[in-house]
Image (cartoon, rainbow, N blue to C red):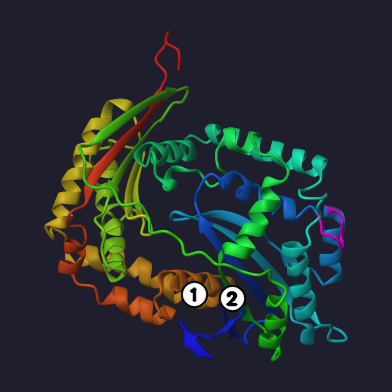
Amino acid sequence: MDRFAGFDRTQIASVPVLWRRDARVKTFRIALHARRPLDGRAAARGLLPELLLEGTERDPSRAALVRRMEALYGCATMPGAGKVGEAHALHLVVDSVAGRFLPGQPDQLGEGLALLGDLLHRPRRDGDGFPRDVFARRQQDQANAARAEFDNKGAYARRQAIALACEGEPYALPEHGGLAAIEALDRCAPEAARRDFLTCGDLVLLAGGALDDGFVDAAAQWLSHLPARRAEALPSPVVVAPRPRRQSLERVELQQSKLWLVFRFPPAPRDVWPARRLFANLLGGGPHARLFKEVRERRSLAYSVQADTDHRKGLLFVSAGLDEATADTVEELVLREIAALTEGQFSAEELATAKAGIVSSLHAVDDSVALRMAFTLERVLDGLDREPREHAAVYAAITADAVAHSAAGLWLDHVYLLAPARRGASS
């Protein structure tokens, strides 16, 4: 047993288990995180959380599952799935009031783990798949949600920009797998995805809050029910060599155009990424940032403009809501500001402001069990043994030169513009 990022840590049944007691709260949270490569099974994996909530062998309906949670004093469970770089992650979380704070001191820890176990190991099934009516209903819901993305033009533009910039790479896949893949599913595919997560997935179990003294023993008993495992390492993200700038134009019915610039950082050690995050913050992290001041405020060329990164894939995104006529000018200004920042042309005050926002958010991590667990999971996935205050200190110590040098080799890969359909022409 050792310590990692301020949590106690041990290994049980080949699964890292991290936990941290917090005497300030009366609730606890337990979360299982499983990762598999992002691939053609994304649609099945994306549908799985909703199917798990349709009941278990013990509680064979959504309503019965809700009644069980109500009987546990409002215990809540939250299955979910999503992209983490070029991995697909399944999350199973249970939140509960600790038994020692309730009448009769019931075993909330044991019951909460039993609920998670039923969802994970004994969901409501019919043979090798989920019940046909349940599967058909949830499949239709997922397909409708995928279609509805088009109605949110901001989210649609982001998805299209990523799909085009990363065509042929796992990262291009949406976390729900895409409409065609959803509609092609059969009822056995999500069940196969569930088994695959458990037998081959990269697993980690985290817990925090008002945990009982017997948590480790309870976790060991719970993990003993995992099937025989042959965990597979996740592949490294696809790295693309610099190539000429590409561009795409799509026309639909909308009023405000959406511009997305997708940049790629060259591969770098993980300790470079805090400086890269500061670079993105200086560029487009809010009202203090260069793009907001120059593009939106001084020149009135965009209604909104911002920048963010995905450090696991090595991408920088710049997005803007604007009139189509200003798109080329905005792109030129973005490139100009990136060049200036890369050359260190920013003030100490700008850097201090960029740091302050990030450091402030890190200081707030300990205000919530959920936030602290999410922070620790990120450190586990990154392999960085740091507590929030230590991570904040890293940001506080970054120099202007380090920020400027962190973006060396950054290159523009793809420009995507979602623009209004022209009158008299099909979209």
Decide whether residue 357 is among the magenta residues: no
Q: Amino acid at mark 1?
A: Thr
* Residue at x 13%, y 60% (from the top left corner): 344
Visible in this render: residue 26? Answer: no
Locate residue 188, reporting x and y percent: 72, 46
Question: In this orientation, which residue lies closer to the viewer: 179 or 241?
Answer: 241
* Residue at x 43%, y 36% (from the top left corner): 160
Question: Where is mark 2, residue-wise?
Answer: 206
Vertical arrangement, residue 419 with respect to residue 130, above or below: above
Locate residue 372, reporting x and y percent: 52, 75
Magenta highlight range: 55-61
Question: Where is mark 1, residue-wise?
Answer: 376
Badge 1 marks a residue whose secondary structure is helix
Question: Farthest residue in the top direction?
Answer: 424
* Displayed quadrant of residue 398: bottom left
Locate residue 379, reporting x and y percent: 44, 73
Q: Amino acid at mark 2?
A: Leu
* 189 left or right, relative to 318: right
* Residue at x 45%, y 17% (from the top left corner): 427
Question: In this orientation, which residue lies closer to the viewer: 228 or 195?
Answer: 228
Q: State how far apart marks 1 and 2 are (Cα).
A: 9 Å
